[in-house]
Image (spheres, grey):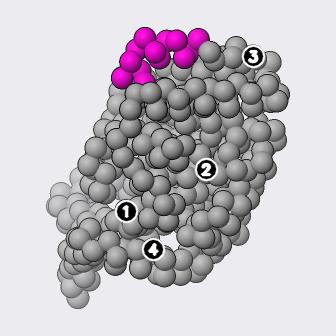
Amino acid sequence: MKNNKIWIFIGLIPISVLITLIARNNPSYAEYYALNIYPIFVRTWGLFSLATRKSIAEIIIIFLLLTIILLTAFIIVKTIETKTFIYIKKYIYGIISFFSVVLFLFVLFCGINYYRYEFTHYSGLEIKESSKEELIELCETLIEDANKTRENLSENKDGTVELLDSHYHAAERAHSSMDKLSEEYSVLRGSYSSPKPVRNSKIMSYLRITGIFFPFTFEANVNVHIPPYQIPSVMLHELVHLRGFMREDEANFISYLACINSGQDDFYYSGTMMALTYSMNALYAEDYHEFVQLYSRYSDGVKRDMEFSRDYWKQFETKVADVSHKANDTYLKFNNQKDGVKSYGRMVDLLLAYYR
């Protein structure tokens, strides 16, 4: 009987693969799911995340890590005492069963959304090849926006920009900003929780993670240890995932739209700085001389924020970060983003289409 239960769990793996293949080859099916079935899970299973502004995902992850450590130690001790491998066998079956359930729930709660229609289907934006001159004009516009908005923001003692209020209030404002954008794009509407600031955010920085959508609790989890000006755009990026758009380039772009339409200076600045970073990186690869010329136009405040961010992330350049980066790259490629982490750069095409 126990063996039958194990095979039932293991059977979830091919079912998960089959569902993924159907979604991969039938975007209309994935879109139907995203619009009609996914919201049902959010309104039922996701109710738990609405009950608290604390991250349930963080608690679950800590609990699982402790459980794995204690259980592994127990299995080792028992194996030594009994001098048999029966406990190791049960442990392996348990791990496989757990992985099967996690994979199935992942596919059910967010994996299918990777294959839905692109946001351009709803925005009407046309992605096409652009000239270097168009890229330069985009960078010039974003630099002007960043410089102007930066003047209205308060600073920390070190001269870098700060948020207007606490992380939890910023999370509520991010939720309102996404609701506001959904008035223009109805596909973003729905009853969702606010982003969740993670208490152990510094650990996320060591893994080079700014935010993560945790589909098992339907939560947008945010690293709030990062430079303050980056937090609003990250909050909105993860909210985009929560609202059903999983592609990274689209999440960045929709986050940008929500930021600049929020009516809040710190959010506007955050979104603009994110867009400026991606656009200038693209220009750097295209024309270094022009990049240097435009960089000189940054205001002193913008330069301080950029330098602070660069110094902040430099301290987390470790082997652990490299492993995390490669894992994320593999994850993206597995989920229909063939360029892996490079897919983040596609946001520039969306920005060019938007300003065009």
* Residue located at (24% from left, 52% from top): 80
Give the label, 2 or 3, closer to the camera. 2
What secondary structure is found at the residue carrying circle 3?
loop
* Magenta stretch: includes residue 44: no
Q: Looking at the image, can residue 194 be seen?
A: no
Give the label, 4 or 3, closer to the camera. 4
Single out the residue that lies furthest toward the left.
84
* Residue located at (69% from left, 63% from top): 179
- Magenta stretch, overall SS: helix
Task: Say whether marks 4 and 2 touch (CB < 8 Å).
Answer: no
Q: What residue did someone put label 2 on?
A: 257
Q: Is residue 298 left or right of residue 317?
A: right
Task: Say whether marks 2 and 1 touch (CB < 8 Å).
Answer: no
| Above or below, comparing residue 55 to residue 275 in the picture | below
Q: CA distance from mark 4 to mark 2?
A: 21 Å
What secondary structure is found at the residue carrying circle 1?
helix
* Residue located at (35% from left, 27% from top): 319
**In the rendered structure, which disc, 4 or 3, sits on the residue that comes first in sequence?**
4
Please give the range of residues in magenta.
283-296
